[in-house]
Image (cartoon, coloured by chain):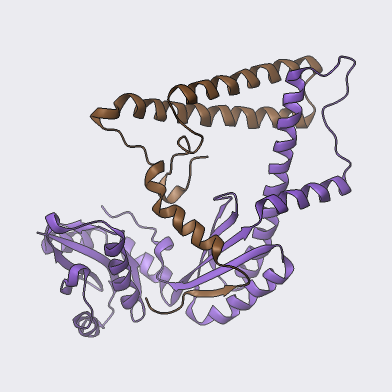
């Protein structure tokens, strides 16, 4: 493996080093469930799924707003609902001492969840 | 005691050469490498004490080193780090059971190498540039104007809509780079796999499988792309064994 494997790069290799560094810190983003942390581990798992669904709903909603198919009143209600959902998620994350990074579970070869 | 499997190797009439090569390299923790074969396929293995085996970075590097050394001379399918079975008999049976799939996959990767391409950007700058370009092309529109004044909720939707449009612009840009890349690589008869937006700065993470003789041509193509997109940073690596083109599921 002594052969130089970088065949082409035009600038700095800092970006690549940073990505490789992230691989070794991926341990942190793995879900670790043990008898001692069953509560917080489960909260992390559940909140991850809720956050994923919330983001998908938000994305779909923005597509509809962008498509111009919603009335003024519908946009108002949509905004209220999505904003409240976002605030509730923030509360829950704070309650369980979780950050956005904690909720972005690494799925191995598939990459990060979000 | 377990037996660790490094790779499945095509040994059409070259079993003797494989044994010679294996005598010259060492497995994990200096383990003796040997081959277990069935028909024209051999599994390269070494004995390993399960209690002493550590699935750590040093082990992974040693494992990859064995695969790399083998790939210089033989067509192979790398096994996932840590793959092990309980006996040579079990490995032999596994090879026989899965032979058609292994043989077919080996033919697909024959005389080919894997290359990796990572494309990085200055995320902030790219977003700003794309937004400016979009504004120039289409004067920005927010939500349709209405008679009622904007509420906090509508302002929130407006903010999210801007973020959404920016993401869409970014994806469109990435898709255009991938499309040009795919067009170039198709001419070289390459198989390609792409991942988009793996991180904020890594907008494309791709692997290609292409003929061993086409390395220099590939470098030239990437150089051309780099000139076309000076704001992006293209990093091409290889040649690698076909890690991302093992398509069989061992039963």
Of B31 and B96, nearer the camera is B31
The quarter of the rendered structure image containing the N terminus of chain A is bottom left
- Indicate the quadrant where residue A87 lies: top right
The spot of residue B67 in percent (x, y) is 32, 71
Instruction: Look at chain A in the picture and name its colour.
Output: brown
Whether residue B76 is visible here, answered yes or no, is: yes
Residue at image coords 36%, 37%:
A31
Q: Residue at x 39, y 58 (%)?
A: B247
Residue B165 is situated, as x and y percent measured from the top left of the image, at 74, 39
Task: Identify the residue at image location x=72%, y=71%.
Answer: B227
Residue B18 as seen in the image, left or right of residue B232:
left
Residue nearest the observer in this picture, B101 or B9: B9
Name the side, left or right, on which B248 lies relative to B210.
Answer: left
For residue A77, side relative to residue B62 (left or right): right
Q: Residue at x 25, y 57 (%)?
A: B82
- Give the x, y percent position of residue A49: 46, 29
């Amino acid at each position: 493996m002594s052969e130089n494997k970088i065949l082409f790069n035009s600038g700095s290799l800092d970006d690549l080093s940073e990505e490789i560094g992230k691989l070794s810190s991926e341990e942190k983003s793995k879900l670790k469930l043990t008898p001692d942390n069953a509560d917080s581990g489960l909260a992390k798992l559940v909140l991850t799924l809720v956050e994923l669904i919330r983001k998908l709903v938000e994305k779909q909603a923005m597509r509809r707003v962008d498509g111009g198919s919603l009335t003024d009143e519908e946009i108002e209600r949509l905004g209220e609902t999505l904003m409240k959902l976002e605030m509730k998620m923030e509360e829950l994350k704070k309650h369980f001492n979780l950050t956005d990074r904690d909720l972005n579970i690494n799925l191995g070869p598939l990459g990060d969840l979000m | 005691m377990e037996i660790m499997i490094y790779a499945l190797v095509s040994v059409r009439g070259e079993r003797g050469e494989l044994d010679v090569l294996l005598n010259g390299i060492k497995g994990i923790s200096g383990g003796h490498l040997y081959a277990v074969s069935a028909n024209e396929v051999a599994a390269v293995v070494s004995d390993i004490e399960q209690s002493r085996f550590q699935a750590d970075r040093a082990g992974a590097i040693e494992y990859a080193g064995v695969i790399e050394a083998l790939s210089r001379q033989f067509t192979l399918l790398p096994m996932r780090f840590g793959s092990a079975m309980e006996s040579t008999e079990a490995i032999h049976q596994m090879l026989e059971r899965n032979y058609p799939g292994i043989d077919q996959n080996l033919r697909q990767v024959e005389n080919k190498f894997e290359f990796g391409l990572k494309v990085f950007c200055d995320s902030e700058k790219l977003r700003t540039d794309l937004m400016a370009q979009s504004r120039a092309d289409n004067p920005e529109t927010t939500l349709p104007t209405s008679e009622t004044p904007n509420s906090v909720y509508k302002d929130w939707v407006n903010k999210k809509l801007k973020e959404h449009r920016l993401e869409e612009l970014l994806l469109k840009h990435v898709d255009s780079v991938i499309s040009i890349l795919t067009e170039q690589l198709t001419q070289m008869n390459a198989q390609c796999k792409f991942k988009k937006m793996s991180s904020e700065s890594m907008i494309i993470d791709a692997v290609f499988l292409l003929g061993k003789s086409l390395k220099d041509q590939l470098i030239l193509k990437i150089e051309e792309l780099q000139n076309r997109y000076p704001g992006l940073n293209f990093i091409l690596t290889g040649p690698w064994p076909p890690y991302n083109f093992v398509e069989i599921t061992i039963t």
